[in-house]
């Protein structure tokens, strides 16, 4: 029987003491949302409050995944940081637009653009 982790791939790249880039691929749903939440919580725990999430490989996201992103954006703001979303697939972008998350959380074409917008390029 496949494990939820088999459906979601999360790679974390630490940029500096306060910035991390998370590349997310696969399916973000009720079975995998907790895994992504744990990755995000770990970044906040270690003082990284500027998070860039590359969604270019994320094929599917349901409301559970959306809730993880909403919580991450809120947690980042509370830590005086920010969350930036990068290159969401068309299906994921549609969910972000329909729910209004794209209005409160910046969407970017690529990671470098997101890092620049976060004031953390380089």
Image: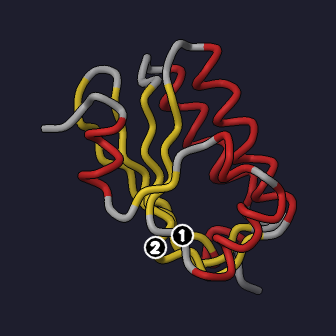
Q: Total label count?
A: 2
Q: Is 49 positioned to the left or the right of 65 in the image?
A: left
Q: Is residue 117 above or below residue 13?
A: above
Side (left or right) of 18 relative to 88? left
Q: CA distance from mark 2 to mark 1?
A: 5 Å
Query: Which sits in the foreground, 47 or 111?
Result: 111
Q: Nearer the viewer, residue 51 or 119?
A: 119
Q: Which residue is mark 1?
A: 88
- Quarter residue 95 falls in: bottom right
Q: Residue furthest left?
A: 122
Q: Quadrant of the N terminus?
A: bottom right
Q: Dot 1, how many residues are within 10 Å of its Cα: few (below 14), some (14-19), or many (20+)? A: many
The disc placed on residue 56 is 2
Q: In the rendered image, which quarter contains the C terminus?
A: top left
Measuring 56% from the left and 78% from the top, which residue is drawn there? Answer: 89
Q: Position of residue 55 (x, y in %)?
A: 50, 66
């Amino acid at each position: 029987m496949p494990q939820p982790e088999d459906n979601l791939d999360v790679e974390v790249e630490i940029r500096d003491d306060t910035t991390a880039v998370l590349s997310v691929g696969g399916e973000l749903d009720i079975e995998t949302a907790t895994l992504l939440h744990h990755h995000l919580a770990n970044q906040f725990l270690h003082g990284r409050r500027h998070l860039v999430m590359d969604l270019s490989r994320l094929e599917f996201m349901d409301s559970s995944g959306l809730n993880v992103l909403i919580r991450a954006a809120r947690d980042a703001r509370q830590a005086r940081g920010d969350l930036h979303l990068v290159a969401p697939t068309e299906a994921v972008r549609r969910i972000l637009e329909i729910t209004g998350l794209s209005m409160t959380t910046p969407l970017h074409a690529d990671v470098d653009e997101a890092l620049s917008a976060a004031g953390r390029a380089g």
